[in-house]
Image (spheres, rainbow, N blue to C red):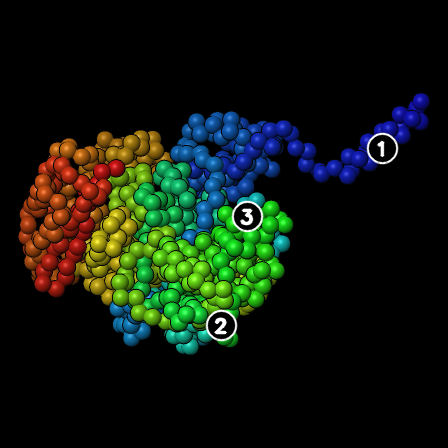
Amino acid sequence: MAIQVLFVILNLCFLLLLLPTTIHTESDHNRKVFVVYMGHNTLDDAASSSLHLSMLQQVIGRDARKHMLQRYTKSFHGFSARLTEEEAKKLSGMEGVVSVFPSKLSQLETTSSWDFLGFPITAKRSTTESDIIIGVFDSGIWPESASLTDLGYGPPPAKWKGICQGNFTCNNKIIGARYFKADGIYDSTELQSPRDSDGHGTHTASTAAGNVVTDANHLGLNTGTARGGVPGARIAVYKVCWIEGCSSEDILSAFDAAIADGVDIISVSVGLRVAEELFTNPFAIGSFHAMKKGILTVQSANNQGPMPQTTGSIAPWILSVAASTKDTDLMTPVRLGNGVVVDGVSINPFTLDGMYPLIYAGDVPNITAGFNSSRSRFCSRNSLDKNLVKGKIILCDGISTGETEMLAGAVGSIMTYPYFDTVLSYPLPVSVVNSEQAATISRYIQSTRNATALILKSEVVKNASAPYVASFSGRGPNPIHQNILKPDLTAPGVRILAAWPPVAPITEVEGDRRAVSFNIVSGTSMACPHVSGIAAYIKTFNPTWSPSAIKSALMTTASAMSDKINTDAEFAYGAGNLNPLAAIKPGLVYEAVEVDYLSFLCLEGYTSQHIRSLTGDNSSSCSQLMEQTKDLNHPTFVIPTLRNRFIDSSFNRTVTNVGSATSTYRSFITRPLVSGLRIQVEPNVLRFEQLGQKLSFKVSVQGIIRRLDNPIVSGALTWDDGVHQVRSPIVVHVP
């Protein structure tokens, strides 16, 4: 019996050796990543780390250390950890904790574009451009790109405190490179370094600050000179985005590091799909602390449009950017066998030789796999009969990646989609047409037994209706703070040519191994670095300007856009389209500093305890703050209201003279195209006697909107001294 018992014990010991060293309890399976945000940090690194661990031990016990992920100690205070809902609730009640929230995954959201914006390659440059550092939060960067070499650059600015991590060598252009992944779990295709295997980060970084590269093109398309907004500026890379997305805890780590490293502008082409409250939102939290250190954060408005309230970038201290078109575009004509030419769009570098048989996808279902025409007409996955599709051009009733058509043996695909600004690159010849054009092609197919077609290579054409906001661009009104206009402005974000890593795919189709040095991509992600670059450009001429002054300069000089094309008006384009050269000489700026934003937070319902945690000042109180400031000094005026309700709103604003020392500005109101509203400005003339002088005024809006075909009516206030036109939207909307 003793031998049998010993044998059983030995077997159990052997099995235990085979088990993972960490034994997971039932509660481990209920854990997920939470961020514990604690506001301003008054402790040193060691004391902060000790406090964080102590707090975690109080709710978890001895195993606390293994559940700790990241600590935020440089620029603000907090940590991330794996917690159960109950543990998170306990932490949220502890002293000094501002918020505890679950980590969410955010999503990654040019050549001729700069010329279209009136910003030529010969634009005046400051001698201090090479001292400006843009921090790019994205999927990393490809340092070997011609857009990112350091030829002609001196050493990094003396203020720089950053580092380079991992399998990455910085140069005098890319002066810092970090990567963050709290869970430490990498996909086999991911580079465990700041290097970019996705392409998105390289594209956005080069759009903001890429070198001048002549003869840039994408497989022969869009040939031109590629350049960033500030080619002489430096880049610091913070890789926060991976195959599964960009996590809250990694984004906060990037903000914590970038602020301490010494960047001047933060460019974030990443966003939440759904807006979050300010202090459960990693972008709002990180950018608030960046603002306190004089750093402007520029963020993409996200790609969830065109429905209202789809922008995820909502904080007033962030500059939120929508995506608009430029005056050149790519057209991909389809020539039918009857001689008719249909002008579709796509990014098509392929050249077909001669006409090919043309078929309709609804006529070739993969019956053996159980599909019928109701599925095959959309070219759904595996829905097409290879025997009937091979060697032909196919008309689909929807849009796809092109993979289904390619695997079925199609020579090319004609896809149907209402929005021409969302098309991508494809692994075979593709032209995207609208429903009316598709009907023309369908009638031709039905008229003959031998329908043929040819998809031509894309060609550059003029887009006379530009700029207008892209259909995918996230819209306002601000889902959480309806008196703050979002997005703030728009910039080119449709089919932008910029640098691309040769290892990154150009389509989503497995097996498409084409390698390029430049790629054409669309998104608010592409619009964001246009504005980041010009924000940096403004700072080169005005190094002491606050983040709000730079934001104001960009907004009040933006080119007005037409609400005939974008019927959602300012909720699509904000203050207007980016105007780079006007932005460096705005005349007047609306400035807001930390205390103004704290007062705003009090008005929005945050408590004095929140404010004390944010500032680290135990004497701060909302009652004191709201006595000092009742209005946020923002360069827009927004009134949420209800139909048939009397409006009686007023706004107190202060402008700072940054134009001519002695100047007189007169106010002009562009009135909304609706009766029943009365807008007054007091005083209506501002006389300045020196630079830096501040003068205040009041805008009053009164009346009743009885009929409203559109949920938004808007006008504008413009201060004009004969040289500068300082324009601010006035928006009334029904939530």
What's the CA distance linking mark 3 and mark 1? 57 Å
Which residue was labeled with disc 3? 372
Q: Amino acid at mark 3?
A: Asn
Q: Nearer the viewer, residue 376 or 724?
A: 376
What's the CA distance linking mark 2 and mark 3? 28 Å
Q: Amino acid at mark 1?
A: Asn
Of badges 2 and 1, nearer the viewer stands 2
**Image x and y of residue 494, in percent:** 37, 60
Earlier residue among tags 2 and 1: 1
Residue displayed at 27% across by 66% down = 464
Disc marking residue 355: 2
Mark 1 surroundings within 10 Å by alpha-carbon count, few (fewer than 14), some (14 through 19), many (20 or more)? few
**Residue 710 visible to the viewer:** yes
**Image x and y of residue 520, in percent:** 43, 65
Earlier residue among tags 3 and 1: 1
**Image x and y of residue 429, in percent:** 49, 66
Residue displayed at 15% across by 32% down = 645
Residue displayed at 51% across by 26% down = 86
Number of on-image labels: 3
Say which quarter of the image contains residue 8: top right
What's the CA distance linking mark 2 and mark 1? 72 Å
User: Disc 3 on helix, strand or loop?
Assistant: loop
Say which quarter of the image contains residue 553: bottom left
User: Taking 535 as reference, is 32 left or right?
Assistant: right
Task: Tell me whether circle 2 and circle 3 mark residues in contact (CB < 8 Å).
Answer: no
Which residue was labeled with disc 1? 11
User: Disc 1 on helix, strand or loop?
Assistant: helix
Q: Nearer the viewer, residue 491 or 612?
A: 491
User: Disc 2 on helix, strand or loop?
Assistant: loop
Q: Amino acid at mark 2?
A: Met
